[in-house]
Amino acid sequence: MVIGIKILRKIVPPLILSLIILGSFICPVMVEAARIKDLAAIKGIRSNQLTGYGLVAGLNGTGDKDNVHFTRRALVNLMERMNVNIPSINDIKVKNVASVMVTAIIPPFARIGDNIDVTVSSLGDAKSLKGGTLLMTPLKGVDDMVYGLAQGMVSLGIPSGANDRDSHLLVGRVVNGGTVEQEIPFKLNGKKFLTLSLFTPDFTTARRMADTINASIGEGIAKIIDGSALGLNVPDDMWEKNVAEFIADIETLSVIPDTVARVIINERTGTVVIGNDVTIAGVAVAHGNLSVTIEQTPGNEVEESLMNLAGTSTIGELVRGLNSLGVKPRDLISILQSIKASGALQAELVVM
């Protein structure tokens, strides 16, 4: 079967092309294989969230106001723990101090003494955390146990020469400011069964993973649970003490992932991203000064605006033809949306 794309231009003035088209239709390439570690992860091996309440000191009068009572109370409690007696809470000023929420992510298998980055966010009515220092703050998990401590200079990441008025001054980071004080237990050795979870669920990709693992490691090792997970049977000669090596052998295997045909449109920027497998059926579109016809069986007439394509036509050829006429990005987006609405676009259309 031969499919023709006929593009007739009525009156189209010269235009400056501002469309950015990304996708393999510009330069067709073979889909590259990816490592299993880039497509999936072992269930249970994950990072965890930590939070804590802390104080940032050393601010140049940009801290919380005196009517933020929890900041004053926290500062009084801190001073009393250091054996500094405060007769009354009204005797303390907090304009150089700010209450903050401290958050961090502890990676899997983090060991005691490892450093992690922490983020501090103002809780009161401070004007800026610039130049402040986070005082020692316990970091707790969802089980209310302390897994880390955080302390250090707060960096706001403001570019050199930038105006503070145009910068966000109430959230900062303390690079390597947290230390792991307690490890989150996760025992690998002794496990006879593992679950491999796909980052993007897809039955075809899951089957390819299972086939690759069984062919490389051993028959019956991997079995598809559903489109998002594979079950892994740890071999008897490995499960006692070599489960980590078993996982390492699997995650380095390469698989060609399958993807859903998809067209992504960003109307604000005029960007269109088109996947490799997107196709279009016969359809006719009239838009403004343009008339676009996609024919299943084109005639024998010869026209300058007619291109014949062997096999199934991809939307890449249509877009290239429209670009050659200087079609504006907004017009192209409207044409693609109309083709999708007619049912001729065999792809998912995502508008951002």
Image: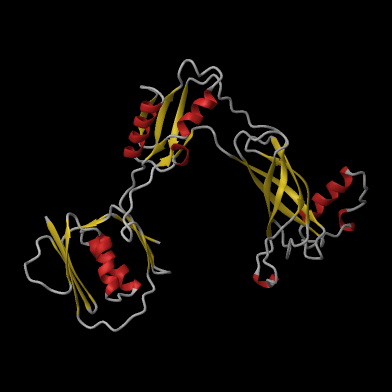
Q: Is residue 156 above or below residue 180?
A: below
Q: How is the image coloured?
A: secondary structure
- Residue 130 lies, with reference to residue 175, above or below; the image says below
Q: In the picture, which quadrant includes the C terminus?
A: bottom left
Coordinates of residue 98 in the picture (x, y in percent) = 76, 57
Q: Nearer the viewer, residue 122 or 130?
A: 130
User: Does residue 264 appear to the left or right of 145 in the view shown?
Assistant: left
Q: How many marks?
A: 0
Q: Is residue 232 left or right of residue 128?
A: left
- Can you give x and y, in whole percent of width and height, for residue 278 in the image? 27, 55
Looking at the picture, how far across and down is residue 115, in whole percent?
70, 42
Image quarter for residue 301? bottom left
Question: In this rendering, is residue 107 above or below 164?
Answer: above
Q: Residue at x 40, y 31 (%)?
A: 230
x%, y% of residue 210?
A: 36, 31
Q: Hey, which quadrant is residue 255 in on the image?
A: top left
Q: Nearer the viewer, residue 183 or 79?
A: 183
For image coordinates 58% across by 25% down, the residue present is 187
